[in-house]
Amino acid sequence: MIQTRRARPADALEVAEMLHAFNTEFDTETPGAEVLAERLGMLLAEPSTFAVLGGDPAVGVALVTLRSNVWSDGPVALLDEMYVAPAQRGTGIGSAILLHMVEICRELGVATIEINVDESDADAMRFYERHGFSGVDPDSGERAFYFYRSLGSLDAGAATG
């Protein structure tokens, strides 16, 4: 049986190291595990952020943030990040982590879980679809899209003009 558990603030470095590894694996900018651990230590102590660790020692993580919304009584959960170490992929650890995450969301009264997936990541799309998630609006059948705009210091000049 695959062990999963909800992370505590004391697990911040363990979560941070996996998130850093995730970004490093996919050549995405990262502030480093130490900076992430400091942020996660604060966030995991708040009710609006939680993480699920999988394995003993942990080899996978899901990081979730919650926000209130006008359309439902319960909050909306955003699966911010999900990562499983490459050597552990295909072993069921990701499914165990995701199922535990969904159970926590149910306990918290979450109305909807949102996940953003890169268009090129067909494996992730299949994984989430296999677990009941959809990339289309259930009422209209239209594809869902995710738009974003960074307001960070690196993008300061992009908003002018």
Image (cartoon, rainbow, N blue to C red):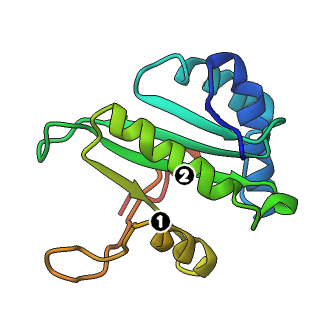
How many C-alpha atoms fall within 10 Å of the one at disc 2: few (<14), some, or many (≥20)? Answer: many
Does residue 80 appear anywhere in the picture? yes
Q: What residue is at 79 percent from the left and 35 percent from the top?
A: 33
Percent from the top left, x then y, of residue 68? 24, 35
Q: Which of marks 2 and 1 is nearer the N terminus?
A: 2
Q: Is residue 157 above or below residue 63?
A: below
Which residue in the protein does label 2 denote?
98
Left or right: residue 136 versus residue 124 is left
Q: In which quarter of the image is residue 67?
A: top left
Residues 120 and 55: in front is 55
Q: In which quarter of the image is residue 9?
A: top right
Q: What residue is at 15 percent from the left and 80 percent from the top?
A: 140
Identified by mark 2, the residue type is Leu
Left or right: residue 83 versus residue 43 is right
Q: Is residue 66 above or below residue 80?
A: above
Percent from the top left, x then y, of residue 23? 73, 54
Residue 131's mark? 1
Q: Does the residue at mark 2 contact the one at mark 1 (Cβ under 8 Å)?
A: yes
Q: What residue is at 46 percent from the left and 62 percent from the top?
A: 116
Residues 133 and 115: in front is 133
Residues 101 and 38: in front is 101
How many numbered marks, from 0 up? 2
Q: In which quarter of the image is residue 109?
A: top left
Identified by mark 1, the residue type is His
Q: What element carries label 1?
A: loop
